[in-house]
Image (cartoon, rainbow, N blue to C red):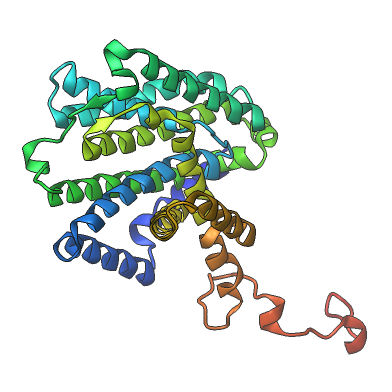
Amino acid sequence: MQEVARKGVGRWRVPLVGASMLTVGGWLAFLVVALIFPQIAPVFWVQFAIDLFVLTLFGLSLNLLMGYGGMVSFGHAAYYALGAYAAALLVKRADVPMPLALALGPFFAAGGAMVFGFFAVRLTAIYFAMLTLAFSQIVYAVVFKWTKFTGGDDGIQGVWPIRALAAPPVSDNYYYFTLGVVLVCTLILYLIVNSPFGYTLRAVRENPRRAEMAGVNVRLHQWVAFVIAGFFAGVAGSLFVFFQGSVNPDYAGVARSTDPLIVALLGGMHHFLGPAVGALLYKIIFFYVGREFPFLWQLLVGLILVGVILLFPGGVMGFLTERRWRTLRWWPRKAGATPTPRETGPQPSSSASGASPDGNA
């Protein structure tokens, strides 16, 4: 455990002072484009970008569970919906100001994750996945049936942000606000997965029995990860409800739970920014196929996603970082990395050279 903690503390320096020039340049270019985007893009694409930011955060939150903790959740939309409904109900039923409701919504989602996760982490594999799905269906049933409080099938309407963030037809201020919140949450998640807790979580993912024998409290780490993932899913839900101006039971539906699963698989669940890449590809595929083939978009989107996942088992990020590019001679290699046989070329056998394996003649 001390070794794991030492490595984890060491890696905390990476996001702060160890970033490469390529990484820093990429983030600076992204920030410049993101800041000027509302000034040059039509309203539709600004709305598209806000939707993309929310989906990215939703996917990153699930990836903490699935990519780093090895826990595949089929019901992650439960915490997305709890955050959204909590924020909406605080505004509409308790007259809480929008900024405070937005800040409190994720804590209700984390509370739900704390209760559900307490039972879910006691199971593994498909049983864990099915139990998370069952919990999301419980949330769906409650918000659907409790008509007097949640609005039932109609949901809750007229949940808009404060005037400073809501200027028709779409608020550039809300775009910047969403971008800022998602970037801050992304940085926090990055620090978490590169912390001693994150490295311990990876050890649990790889071999929970061996981690337990090393003294790790496996269930406690999985439970904490479950609550953290639920909190950030609640942030995504709270942001989205003020963007849409309404919330309904579909926020907790099965279809909503598949969104973060797809973007994580598409982008690469073992890469931190994989869900961000997956969310971008998913939204682009969804938009263009839906526009060109309005009656066949579900079939075509499904076929495209199946093809991409089969061709790139590690996701797009896995393909870019692990397979093709690292075999090229000009691609920068990490210090101490062993060159591949393709780079070094054929090696003479010991029998041909007349030397023994240890180098002695």
Q: Is residue 49 left or right of residue 259?
A: left
Outermost residue to the bottom: 353
Q: Is residue 212 visible?
A: yes
- x and y percentages locating residue 13 in the rendered image: 39, 54
Q: In the figure, 217 relative to 65: above or below?
A: above
- The residue nearer to you, when weighing 233 against 147, is 147
Q: Is residue 179 left or right of residue 67?
A: left
- The residue nearer to you, when weighing 57 against 210, is 57
Numbered disc total? 0
- The residue nearer to you, when weighing 22 against 140, is 140
Q: Residue at x 58, y 80 (%)?
A: 328
Q: Quadrant of the C terminus?
A: bottom right
Q: In the figure, 154 relative to 291: above or below?
A: above
Q: Residue at x 35, y 25 (%)?
A: 82
- x and y percentages locating residue 47 in the rendered image: 24, 51
Q: Residue at x 10, y 46 (%)?
A: 168
Q: Is residue 217 visible?
A: no
The answer to which quarter of the image holds residue 248 is top left
- x and y percentages locating residue 98 in the rendered image: 15, 30
Q: Is residue 150 left or right of residue 101?
A: right
Q: Quadrant of the N terminus?
A: top right
- The residue nearer to you, when weighing 253 against 325, is 253
